[in-house]
Each structure stands twice: as structure tokens, then as C-alpha cells.
Amino acid sequence: MDVVAGRQIRPVASPPSPGPIELSVIVPTFNERGNVAPLLARLETALGGVAWEAIFVDDDSPDGTAQQVKAIAAHDPRVRCLRRVNRRGLAGACIEGILGSSASYVAVIDADLQHDETLLPRMLDSLRSGRSDLVVATRFGAGGSAEALSPARGMGSRLARRLAWSLGGVALSDPMSGFFAIRRDRFEPLAASLSPHGFKILLDIVMRAEGTLRIAEEPYAFGSRVYGESKLDALVVIEYLGLLISRVSRDAVTARFLSHALVGVVGLGVHLAALRGGLALGLPFVRAYALGAVVTLGASFLVTNLLLTHHDRRLRGWAVIRGLVVFCVTSALGLVAGMGTAAWLYTLRPVWWLAGAAGAVIGAVWSHATSPRFVWHVK
């Protein structure tokens, strides 16, 4: 028995002698240290008689998830750890984990113990037999249950399903599922076209396959989280909508563009409203523009921090004040350039909203090109 960070780790039962791996179980993780050993114990019980391995793909968790996995892997060759640095997102973690497997079949399961690992043998059998290329564990099919979801998450899942059906033409009962198994030889041709951003890789796989996959569903009861915390937040919702629109438009509109457009639309609306208010108070155009620009900086910072930043990089407490100051400093050059452009246009043609919008666009482009690196350390 080993000790890591003051905690005892009981290794999984002695593994069988090495041989060809038939099933790789991909487990994307971020701050799931307390769930690693319980999940492996459950996989050990569920996959008796199967040559399996577990590949944990960890996004550099500060709670020591990767170290926990490696401590167990030192005694069990079926356990592997892929630690990613300076990268975030469940979809990218799943893609890298699957591409790191040499097994004929791969399954993706969350580390939070909410997925029913006892389904894995049935899912594997469906793939082995050739009846299907992709097997999806569903909470919403006949015999499934999503009672463990909170009312808000339940409503969100229902809305996401309707959007997937209506916009994407995806006829799955649970397109938001994070629990599925697929033949590796059917996944690999799709890998290069999949988005590494966001949390819903299953939907992306199905939409990219364009009807060429034979899909089966297995119902299960969604469990309750015991350790850790949910990663679902506003960014997940925005990335999901972005993925849908990106795929429906055949990548003419990207998810990244949509997230920047959201900030831009909010910022432009705030800027024009503040500019109009300043003019109504009798301020000269340049001063009214400056008022609008300063108010817009604050609004753009808050929207980006609360809605478009990964949970672990989001600023909290006093860090919000520091971040706002850095955001304003890095945006200053764009603000000055935008103000100069707006003032020049206003002298040519005194249409306040046209000049204000032109200046705001210049300022926004500069701000969003520079501030993420210095404020949220996004490379």
C-alpha cells in the first residue's frame, strides 16, 4: 500500500498477465482525485474476463489527480496516465486518449462515478458482434433514468436534445451523453475533423460521421456525484451551441467566432447605449465616446470572465479587481485607436451611432487579441 499526499492508496487487485488489450476505457479528468481508486475498483468488477486498460487523460489537475493515477499505475500496467498541460476541454482529452490506444474498441466514461460501468460488457458485446459501430449509454431511452440530475440540468438536457434533433438532425435519445463506446477503426478517420474544444464529443462524432455509423443505445440510471464538483457552467452551454452551429454551417461559422461575437454584441450594445446617454447629457462626442468605451471595457471583462473562461481560470475575489485593471491597461491602445477613428468619422459625417460603432469594433478587436494572454493566461 502506498501513501500519496498523506492518503493511503489501495491498488486494484493484481492484474492478469500482459496480453493484447481489447478495450481501452478513456477517462477524462480534472480535479477528480477522490474518484480514481473507486472507479478502477468498479471497472475491475465489471470487466472480469475482458483484457482492458484505463487511460486517464488529466488536464493538469491542481488536486493531484495525475499523481494519484500514476501511483496506482506503478503497480497495475492496465492503468495509464496522460497529463496534458496548457490545454483544456473534455473533447480534446477524449480525442487524445482514444488516439493513444491500440485496442480494437474504446469506451469513454466520466470519472465522477455517475455512469454505470456495468453496461460496458454489453456495449463491448454489441461492438464485437458487428451489430454496431457506436454504442451510446442513454439516460433518456426506454429503461433509462436521469432522476439524479438537478431540475436546471434536466431542463437544459431536454433543450439540448431538441436542438440536436432540430438543428443537427441527430436522432439520439441522449446526444449529450458522455458515456459511449466505439470501434477505434471507425473513430480514427473522423479524429482530425473533430473539435478539441467543448464537452460534447459524442454529438460531434455523430454529426461528422454523417450517417455512416451503425448506432445502438443502452439505457442506464444516471447516478449522483460523490466526490468533486460538476464542470457544467455557462461556458459548456455556449460551446455546445457553438458546436451545433459550426457543424450545421459546415464550419463556415466556428465556435470560437461565436464566442467572440457574443462578447462583441454585448460590448457594442453597451457602448452605444452609454455613448447615447453621454450625448443626451450634453457631453461633446469625444467625451461621450470615452464614457461609452470605459463602461464597455467593464462589461466585456465581466462577460468574458463569467461566461467565456474555463472554470479553473476564472478570476474570483480580489483577483477580479486586478484582472480588470490589467484588462483595461492591455486594451488602452485599442481604446485610443478606436476613439481617434470615431472622432475622425464624426467630423466627416456626424452620425453618432455609425462613428461610435466603428470605433468600438477597432477597440474590441485589439482587446480580444491581447487581453486573454495577460488577464487569464490563455496562450
Image (cartoon, helix red, strand yellow):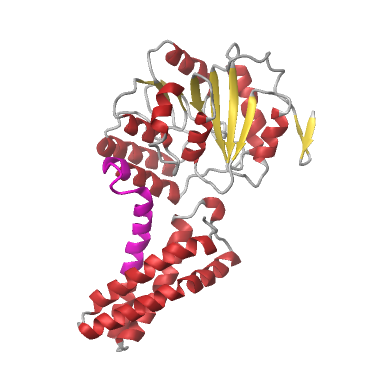
The residue closer to the viewer here, 92 or 47, is: 92
Quarter of the rendering containing residue 175? top left
Quarter of the rendering containing residue 264? bottom left
- Residue drawn 24% across the image and 86% down it: 347
Is residue 327 visible in the rendered image? The answer is: yes
Q: Residue 119: x and y, percent? A: 50, 20
355 w.r.t. 257: above or below: below
95 w.r.t. 312: above or below: above
322 w.r.t. 41: above or below: below
Main secondary structure of the magenta stretch: helix
- Count of labels in the image: 0
Quarter of the rendering containing residue 117? top right
- Residue drawn 41% across the image and 39% down it: 154
Q: Residue 261: x and y, percent? A: 34, 58
Is residue 137 visible in the rendered image? The answer is: no
The residue closer to the viewer here, 107 or 173, is: 107
Q: Residue 54: x and y, percent? A: 59, 26
Looking at the rendering, in which quadrant would you find the N terminus?
A: top right
The segment highlighted magenta reads 246-270
In reply to whether residue 269 is colored magenta, the answer given is: yes
In reply to whether residue 227 is colored magenta, the answer given is: no
The residue closer to the viewer here, 218 or 353, is: 353
In the shown orientation, is residue 280 left or right of residue 95? left
- Residue drawn 51% across the image and 15% down it: 121
Q: Residue 267: x and y, percent? A: 36, 67
